[in-house]
Image: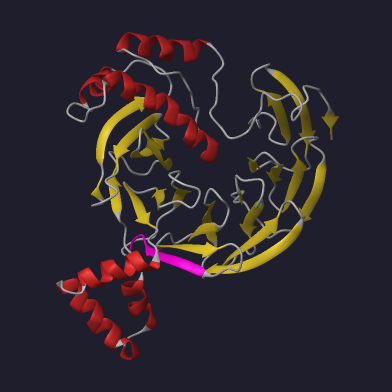
Amino acid sequence: MVTLSSPRKLRVCHFRKGTEICYYSYSNTILAVKLNRSRLVVCLQESLYIHNINTMKVLHTIRETPPNLAGLCTLSIVSQDCYLAYPGSNTIGEVQIFDAINLQAKIMIPAHDSPLAALAFNPNGTKIATASEKGTVIRVFQVHDGTKLFEFRRGVKRCVSISSLTFSMDSMDSMFLCCSSNTETVHIFKLEEPKEALRQATEESQTWMGYLTKAVSASANYLPSQVTDVFNQGRAFASVHLPFQGLKSVCAIIVVQKVFRLLVASADGYLYVYNLDTTEGGDCTLLKQHRLDGKRDDVDCASVSTAESGSGETPAATATEIVQNAAYINSYAGVLRGYSSNSISDSEKYHETIAATVESPPTFSCPFRLNDDAEFPPITQNMD
């Protein structure tokens, strides 16, 4: 935890016991904190501190990094391939990959011409997605050697500020990548294997777009490289038109009862749940919206009871999914409050659960065994 009143102090606490494990004081404002089961990383404007999460001792300090005013960095969630990524430059979009286990630089990836705005590892830490301050192109690279795997066109007309970039949690390798910005649209890209992409290209070759693409490819030598690049970039597989714009939002794709769901949490305090058609893509349909502050909302309560009619899911099961899914966003974005609950059989028990989460400390669903005293000794240390 880092508070506004003490922006230079990091407190590590035991969730279940409510006790403080330790706290560190740093020379400058803490801009970001990332952690997995092996490492905890604290990002300052021009340095990064890597801690052993078992002892909380500083293992390594990366000093004199390029000025990173936004605190942009990301840490892979797995302990085996524990990589840290951060901007290698503040003038162009270079990504520095650092091995947080062996404590050595791994590779520098030239991702964009403009400075970086967003970074995200896939669940197994083998791929990294990037976006620049322009926000028009999303790229995915192989972490091992920096090979570019995918390139997607988010937009052409306007530059945007990317606020969230996240791989789906359907598997360790991920099938989808979603991004949200300060616009009203959330884009979902499908990470197709080469064979699948080739099959789709063959099917599209009979359409007018296929003929146009062939024409552009044939005349590539006569057109500016910027034009041919636009035609060669992948388009969004699916999208969401949010009921707002200009607000910061966080998105995530997870699987609930074998069904894909897109979650979007916005700065106005709402969690929006959308259905994602993994076969056809297109516009995602809004299933429900939920207030994250726990207050009653007549419109939302009505939507919970009617949004899933005809889908085979009971209102109670749907409500439980909202509570559980909020925790996934919290695990990756670090800005939302996630709650987890057991299976609930009817609407009355659902409302009781909501009330309980407001009154008692929440139980977070995350990959870290924070209740294990062996890994997180409940001791208080002043480490300045």
Q: Is residue 337 above or below residue 179?
A: above
State the residue at coordinates (29%, 83%): 217
Nearest to the observer: residue 257 or residue 10:
257
Nearest to the observer: residue 224 or residue 121:
121
Q: Is residue 101 above or below residue 94?
A: above
Q: Position of residue 229 (x, y in %)?
A: 37, 76
Residue 165 can be seen in this image: no
Q: Position of residue 27 (x, y in %)?
A: 79, 42
State the residue at coordinates (37%, 44%): 246
Nearest to the observer: residue 12 or residue 2:
12
- 152 in magenta: yes
State the residue at coordinates (36%, 60%): 154
Q: Quadrant of residue 313?
A: top left
Q: Position of residue 195 (x, y in %)?
A: 36, 68
For the magenta stretch, what is the residue range? 148-155
- 258 in magenta: no
The chief SS type of the magenta part is strand
State the residue at coordinates (71%, 43%): 39
Q: Is residue 33 above or below residue 339?
A: below
Q: Quadrant of the N terminus?
A: top right
